[in-house]
């Protein structure tokens, strides 16, 4: 009851990260500047050193016209984009807002109608949607959901490195499968 809107947004984002990681999906947070500098290569979005298969935008109600145009480029390249709970319909600020809000709405409406972008409300199970609808495989496979186990995955030309962390204060025994069938862990 003492939370402000930023606290609520942060808690929701933290919960989203927990849901993704507990189901084996590795994720990163990116800001507008990083997204605008990103490049597309072979149906992968490259943001700095990170290679991203899907872009998830949770609870965002405002985006710049530049981001709307970048999202269009990303979606047309075949990289899935999911808006969670809200679809942005305006830009932040007032400079040319009427014209830009209309452009943003037109771009996103067209992408959603042509099935280049997806909208999921809070009633959808994101992990199920990723695996069953978009056929995106998690980075690791747990026998069951593991909300206290987080991991980082780094790839090199010849190896994949996984760093696991148990965020609870109790020891855990967890069965983990890796998606690299041709390698020995």
Image (cartoon, rainbow, N blue to C red):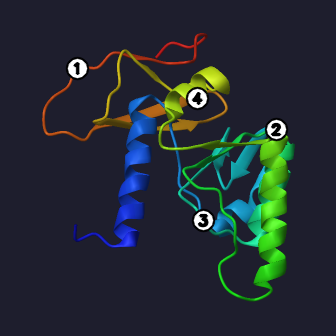
| Residue 71 appears in the picture as rendered | yes
As measured in the structure, the alpha-carbon distance from the residue carrying label 4 to the one carrying label 3 is 22 Å
Q: Nearer the viewer, residue 56 or 153?
A: 56
Q: Nearer the viewer, residue 152 or 161?
A: 152
Label 4 neighbour load within 10 Å: few <14, some 14-19, many 20+: few
For marks 3 and 2, the one nearer the N-term is 3
Q: Is residue 92 above or below residue 124?
A: below
For marks 4 and 3, the one nearer the N-term is 3
Q: Residue furthest left?
A: 170
Callout in the foreground (1, 4): 4
Callout in the foreground (2, 1): 2
Residue in view at x 58 percent, y 55 percent: 86
Q: Is residue 59 above or below residue 96?
A: above
Q: Is residue 23 above or below residue 62?
A: above
Label 3 neighbour load within 10 Å: few <14, some 14-19, many 20+: some
Callout in the foreground (2, 4): 4
| Residue 135 appears in the picture as rendered | no
Check contact, mark 3 vs mark 2: CB within 8 A. Answer: no
Label 2 neighbour load within 10 Å: few <14, some 14-19, many 20+: some
Dot 2: element: loop
As measured in the structure, the alpha-carbon distance from the residue carrying label 1 to the one carrying label 4 is 28 Å
As measured in the structure, the alpha-carbon distance from the residue carrying label 3 to the one carrying label 2 is 23 Å
Per the image, the residue denoted by label 2 is 78
Quarter of image, res 135? top right
């Amino acid at each position: 009851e003492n939370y402000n809107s930023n606290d609520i947004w942060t808690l929701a984002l933290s919960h989203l990260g927990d849901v993704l990681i507990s189901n084996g999906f590795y994720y990163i947070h990116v800001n507008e500047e990083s997204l605008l500098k990103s490049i597309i290569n072979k149906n992968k979005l490259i943001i700095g050193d990170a290679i991203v298969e899907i872009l998830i935008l949770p609870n965002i109600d405002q985006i710049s016209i530049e981001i709307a145009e970048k999202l269009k480029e990303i979606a047309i390249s075949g990289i899935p984009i999911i808006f969670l709970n809200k679809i942005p319909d305006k830009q932040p600020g007032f400079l040319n807002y009427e014209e830009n809000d209309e452009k943003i709405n037109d771009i996103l409406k067209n992408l959603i109608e042509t099935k280049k972008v997806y909208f999921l409300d809070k009633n959808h199970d994101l992990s199920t949607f990723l695996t069953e609808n978009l056929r995106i495989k998690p980075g690791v496979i747990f026998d069951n959901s593991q909300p206290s186990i987080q991991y980082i995955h780094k790839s090199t030309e010849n190896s994949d490195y996984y760093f696991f962390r148990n965020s609870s204060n109790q020891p855990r025994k967890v069965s983990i499968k890796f998606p690299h069938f041709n390698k020995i862990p």
